[in-house]
Image: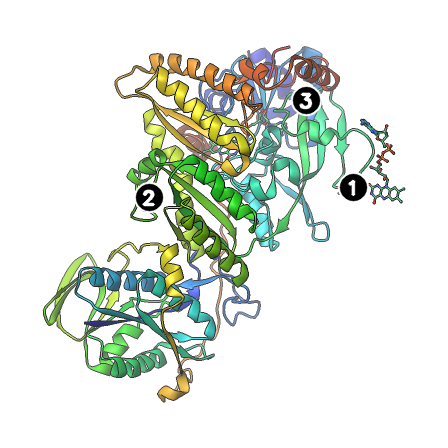
Amino acid sequence: MKVLVPIKRVVDYNVKVRVKADNSGVELANVKMAMNPFCEIAVEEAVRLKEKGVVTEIVAVTIGSKAAQEQLRTAMALGADRSILIETEEDAQPLAIAKALKAIVEKEQPQLVILGKQAIDGDNSQTGQMLAALTGMGQGTFASEVVVDGDKVKVTREVDGGFQTVELKLPAVITTDLRLNEPRYASLPNIMKAKKKPLDTVSAADLGVDFAPRTKTLKVEAPAARSAGIKVASVEELVSKLKNEAKVI
Amino acid sequence: MSAVADLFRPLLGARCLTDEDSLKRYGVDWTKVWAPAPSAVLLPESTEEVQAIVRLANEHRIALVPSGGRTGLSAAAVAADGEVVVAFDRMNKVLDFSPFDRAVTVQPGVITQQLQEFAEQQGLFYPVDFASAGSSNIGGNIGTNAGGIKVIRYGMTRDWITGLKVVTGKGELLDLNKGLAKNATGYDFRHLMIGSEGTLGFVVEATVKLARQPDNLTVLVLGAPGFREVMRILHAFQSKIDLTAFEFFSDKAMSHVLAHGVARPFDGEAPFYCLLEFEGSSDGVMNDAMALFEDCVEKGWVLDGVMSQSLTQASQLWQLRERISESISIYTPYKNDISVTVAKVPDFVEEVDAIVQANYPDFEIVWFGHIGDGNMHLNILKPADLPKEEFFARCNNVSKWVFEIVEKYNGSISAEHGVGRTKKAYLGYSRSPEEIALMKAVKAAFDPNGIMNPGKIFDL
Ligand SMILES: Cc1cc2nc3c(=O)[nH]c(=O)nc-3n(C[C@H](O)[C@H](O)[C@H](O)COP(=O)(O)OP(=O)(O)OC[C@H]3O[C@@H](n4cnc5c(N)ncnc54)[C@H](O)[C@@H]3O)c2cc1C
Ligand SMILES: Cc1cc2nc3c(=O)[nH]c(=O)nc-3n(C[C@H](O)[C@H](O)[C@H](O)COP(=O)(O)OP(=O)(O)OC[C@H]3O[C@@H](n4cnc5c(N)ncnc54)[C@H](O)[C@@H]3O)c2cc1C
């Protein structure tokens, strides 16, 4: 069976983001970009399903600029068999992304679509849900466990205060939560092999999807600054600092 | 005891501490071998106060111990004999920043990490970095000439200090080198101060050069079949790429750090691992790295390897190296920080391994270190059934053998942690009697009454 893994290029989780001077967004010039961490988990889950013999082909897809090829190469180094770039210079919003993915789903006919539960840039947590609604597939969101059984998939969901297990008929949409798995590193031999795997580019216009934004960002603000923390050498030092400097005990 | 404190109290008031907590806290560094016993702790707020302290100490022949973040690993900041500790907690300000010089002037109590963060805010980079950077301070880093994980590219603390203000053991204030890049006017006392472990005077101000920020730091972790192959990998990569780090660790170190909860880099196992870091700033560099990897695999030097795909993964891979120390700390390890020139590293390690295994076959040796600089951290874990005293008694023998081998290889008994008290008895393995006599003469010129951190590095 085929699985489609949509991934997103975002600001590297380790970068301290800076708000632009005009508060219109965050600084992206010369900032290190990487695959969204939840997408890494989605790729890893697909690869594990393939290693178990459940999945036969993994297709990674992303919507973004040419630069996003870098993340598709990473997905292929981790185990995706081929990938598709839906090229646009537009900063696509979740609805447009979901519509573009629907077009790919119609073409590729995957049995599973595994996405991150959210991307750490917009923190929207909308794309997977919208894609499920647009395609009429069932959805298992915030997955911490995925078990495929014949033409069904059981998804354990992380919900407030516990777990909920749902059973979905294939094809289905799954979004990944943090504890689903621990993604592997890309091995150097696989990074080299990934260079030779197929990467197709489709222009967003060809898919007939309207990428015009539906929401407008009014203002982006940095959280209030905190002073830097320090490490103390011993319990005594901690107690002394709490007593004499913080004056809390 | 309190008579000593009474001398300084008129000068510093409440900033002359004598409470039990403070004496205990300020009297030790990371070594915790000698019980802290200072007679007072002083917290000066200005250069004038430091000078006044030194004058009083000279008058009454009171020993002073300069104190930084007390993360030192050689007991250089220890006050175990009734000394007066002078700590720089209150002199912790950034005084000046010059964008054109790319230089920042700081007081000695600025924490290393704060300096790093200050540099980052200016779009620049302070490259001296190590695991204790969150607690150590610039004064202490200058005191030990601290090194760390990026020395292969950026050098030691020494390479970043362009100016120092110093109060000598006599109480004079020296303004050394004044931030200049070029200054051909005779002896450069700045470099005498750096690494002097508080035995010549107090650093009261430092001007520190900053670098441009590195671009897209990328980490490789490679498995190698043997130690000699690790060195070949280093040589191969250095021929094409400016590495910002080259660390190594043995399979034993790896198994402890994995047991400690750090994620495995790849499935296969290898007797040795190395971690390489470089700026992945262009496709050209990345392609070079790939080609080098391929070449090393073909030659049989590399068994397997991974490459970070994000800064997040790069920092996760660093955990494999940076968390070794804490992962073995439950085994009460014996530790030694030594160096030889890079070319001699494999023979040196082999010889140390052989002598330890021949005498104490039940000792587990864990090697890791900044191998790109020829700097090894030797760790020996205490066998569970061996009493602590017996273990450390045997380790004293190990030290002697190791230092004899260090001497034979023209290496250093202390690569970057200093001499302090812990290695004082062994200084002769690395420095000649003539050198040590000159060191004493230098000390006498800066500190005629011997009040500055006596009993550290050498005895007078
Ligand atoms: C987990 C860990 C990892 C470490 N890793 C490294 C590493 O990779 N590389 C490395 O080089 N070190 C390392 N160290 C050792 C230590 O952090 C360094 O030696 C550091 O430079 C000590 O700084 P400090 O401020 O703690 O100095 P302290 O320990 O307080 O003092 C060190 C010396 O400097 C003197 N001194 C302090 N302030 C002044 C002053 N204002 N004027 C004159 N003399 C002064 C003291 O008298 C003493 O002799 C490590 C330590 C730990 C605990
Ligand atoms: C056209 C020209 C251009 C120059 N440009 C530069 C420049 O760009 N940058 C620069 O830095 N200099 C420059 N110089 C100056 C000069 O070349 C340098 O100072 C150079 O280092 C001197 O080397 P030397 O062998 O001629 O030394 P000498 O002039 O012979 O001696 C210089 C000093 O070194 C001492 N000395 C020599 N040998 C030893 C030894 N074995 N042990 C101990 N002490 C010793 C001498 O006693 C003397 O004090 C220039 C000079 C000229 C003529």
Looking at the image, residue B263 lies above or below residue A124: above
Query: Callout 2: few (<14), some (14-19), or many (20+) C-alpha neighbours within 10 Å?
Result: some
Residue at 29 percent of width and 60 percent of height: A41
Disc 2 marks which amino acid?
Answer: Val
Tell me the chain of label 1: B
Q: Which residue is mark 3?
A: B200
Q: Coloring scheme of the render?
A: rainbow
- Contact, CB < 8 Å: mark 2 with mark 3? no
Q: Which residue is mark 2?
A: B262
Image spot of residue B374 (x, y percent): 53, 33
Q: Nearer the viewer, residue B40 or A20?
A: A20
Q: Which element type, helix, strand or loop, lies under badge 2? A: loop
Label 1 sits on what residue type? Lys
Q: Residues within 10 Å of mark 1 (few under 14, many from 20)?
A: few
Q: Evaluate whether residue B291 shows in this view.
A: yes
Q: Nearer the viewer, residue B459 or B363?
A: B363
Which residue is rendered at x = 51% and y = 16% of the image?
Answer: B404
- Looking at the image, in which quadrant does ligand 1 appear? top right
Q: Which badge, 2 or 3, comes first in the chain's sequence?
A: 3
- Estimate how packed mark 3 is, as few (under 14), some (14 to 19) or many (20 or more) residues with alpha carbons within 10 Å: many
- Quadrant for residue A157, please give it: bottom left
Label 1, on which residue?
Answer: B182
